[in-house]
Image (tube, rainbow, N blue to C red):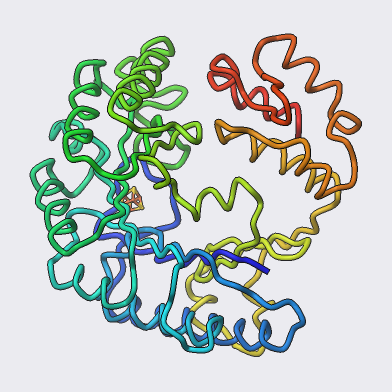
Amino acid sequence: MKSGIYIHIPFCARKCRYCDFFSYAADESTKLAYIKALVREIEAYGKIIRKSENKVEISTVYIGGGTPSVVPAEYIDEILRAISLAFCNGEKFQGQEITIEMNPATVTQDKLEKYRESCINRISIGMQSANDKELELLGRLHSYDDFVACYEMVRKTGFRNVNIDVMSALPRQTISSYEDTLQKVIDLDPEHISSYSLIIEQGTPFYGLYGENGSKKSELPDEDTERDMYDLTVEKLAEAGYERYEISNYSKAGMYSRHNTSYWKRTPYHGFGAGASSFWGNKRWKNTSDMKKYLQLDPERLEEIRTEVEDITRMDAMSETVFLGLRMTKGISKKEFFEAFNEDIHAVFGKEIEKHVKAGTMIEEGDRLFLSERGIDVSNYVFADFV
Ligand code: SF4
């Protein structure tokens, strides 16, 4: 069975002010102990998989975080070797998409060369903005010039599949400063661009400033401006030859993220590391985010680090197929739904589909069901009807 692998590296050089991901600044000995625990987890899981009848074929590996580039490149190599031994008989990766996320402030030429030797073939760089004032406000560790230097190093090292992350709806961001960021990204000509709106998460320093009762809430762009920024993204990136294939993701022809697409298509995946989620068989689970507990991981008792183990019912699986599939601009195939569940999608979700087609938020065309532009604007409201 095809599977993706997600590796979580929960370390960052410093916490950004808007971030609620599981990540923190750790000392070198914690990083080393963590990599050792991670390798133990991969090896132990590999043993289980090799004994089971379900053979696993790894299609993608995604090393995310946190900031994976904050640990030495040798640690990343160790992890990839453990994956190869556990799932690919120790053979060199061939044909898999292997991505690593990086923060421009933590990259060196030497690290990039080592990544290539480790078979990494896709780089995802968090740029977020081309405006230094916005970067400072976000608490990012890099300037725009640092980002450009990093991008040039990545290209010089020979990487031909690069994603750049940008953010919109930032405090004090204007349409024109966002347009400038987009233009600068387009000029760099990456294969893939992700653009997400800032979400003010509880528990972050930003929440006190820009959350519900935040003292500086008025500095956030209003809803109409946020929508204009989204429309501008779609328009500018289309003009520059990028296809929007998911609500927030754009790529040159064929250069979509295979790993992220596999989430939206419900391909199984194994997540390794503290806080990583997995989806395999009819179960989902999440590893503990308790670092102390994770570092003590006993390879004979992997179940001890698993939390939030959830059985996926047939109805859950059908719902997920629809609301994850609708994230993609091509939406879902009614035929594929039938092949997966032996049931017509209209027999299960007929009322909901009719409601949204009538409201103009969903389009039914031949075999496909997908969100309209209006539906993308209110996608969370549409998805809620299928949960
Ligand atoms: S670099 Fe990324 S993961 Fe780390 S704190 Fe900033 S936003 Fe969060």
Question: Residue 155 appears at what percent x and percent y?
Answer: 17, 56
Q: Residue at x 40, y 66 (%)?
A: 9
Question: Residue 92 appears at what percent x and percent y?
Answer: 41, 82
Residue 189 falls in image quadrant: top left
For the image, the number of numbered tags is 0
Residue 98 falls in image quadrant: bottom left
Q: Residue at x 17, y 32 (%)?
A: 184
Question: Residue 230 appears at what percent x and percent y?
Answer: 39, 21
Looking at the figure, which quarter contains the N terminus? bottom right
Horizontal arrangement in the rendering, residue 97 relative to residue 153 (left or right): right
Horizontal arrangement in the rendering, residue 217 relative to residue 372 (left or right): left
The residue lying toward the viewer, choosing from 166 and 363, is: 363
Q: Is residue 366 above or below residue 159?
A: above
Looking at the figure, which quarter contains the C terminus? top right
Q: Is residue 34 visible?
A: no
Q: Residue at x 39, y 31 (%)?
A: 198
